[in-house]
Image (spheres, rainbow, N blue to C red):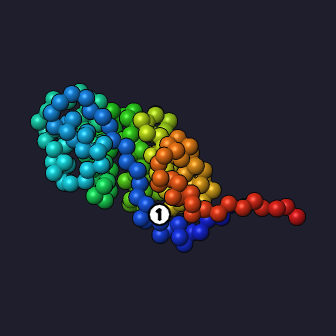
Amino acid sequence: MWKTMLAAGAAVLGLAGSAHSAVTVIGGGMAQACSRAAIGGESDPKFQEVCTLALETEFLHPRDRAGTYVNRGVLKLRRMSYADAARDFDMALRVKPNLGEAYVNRGAAAIGLKRYEASLADINRGLELGVEEPAKAYYNRALAYEGLEDAKSAYFDYQKALEISPDWELPREQLARFTVTRRTER
């Protein structure tokens, strides 16, 4: 039988936050600055403005346009503007429907909105399409499973995230909360 300390898990779930996957934009200008900010972990609103200016004023290849929407959405996720971030991921998918990072990040926004079922569908689609940082996708999917009170699936996804990215502390910290026991048959 799989057990986890659900009371502690619920509290940590709110604090852990989701992992965000930015998209590298090649070239110069504001779109690239937006990409660097998203990849670099920035959260200052001024970087969102840089992304917006890039989208409004720069001629961008469709992949870079979609990537800039994803990156602006990532910046919004860091500020817990989940609904606004989800709109950016929707825009990215209109431009490039097969961009795995847009799905994974839209799933992260859904987790922030406590829409766990929707997050699973998006994260699974992102994993099917392929993402540059699959460990983050598995970590987010684990958070969604915890939100759905499916401790066993969460445990396996935290393990998968750690297997892919063994130096990443977040999945290791989450796994430390779990107690795994085997049910004995009588």
Judging by the rendered image, the residue that carries numbered circle 1 is 13
Residue 12 drawn at (x, y percent): 47, 66
Horizontally, is 68 left or right of 122 in the view?
A: left
The total of numbered circles placed on residues is 1
Query: Mark 1 is on which residue type?
Result: Leu
Residue 104 drawn at (x, y percent): 42, 44
160 vs 145, nearest the viewer = 160
The crowd level at tag 1 (other Cα within 10 Å; few <14, some 14-19, many 20+) is: some
Seen at 47% across and 48% down, the residue is 168
The residue tagged with tag 1: helix, strand or loop?
helix
- The vertical placement of 131 against 162, above or below, is above
Image quadrant in which you'd find residue 150? bottom right
Horizontally, is 150 left or right of 89 in the view?
A: right
Residue 162 drawn at (x, y percent): 53, 47
Q: Which image quadrant: the N terminus?
A: bottom right
Q: Which image quadrant: the C terminus?
A: bottom right
Horizontally, is 163 left or right of 14 in the view?
A: right
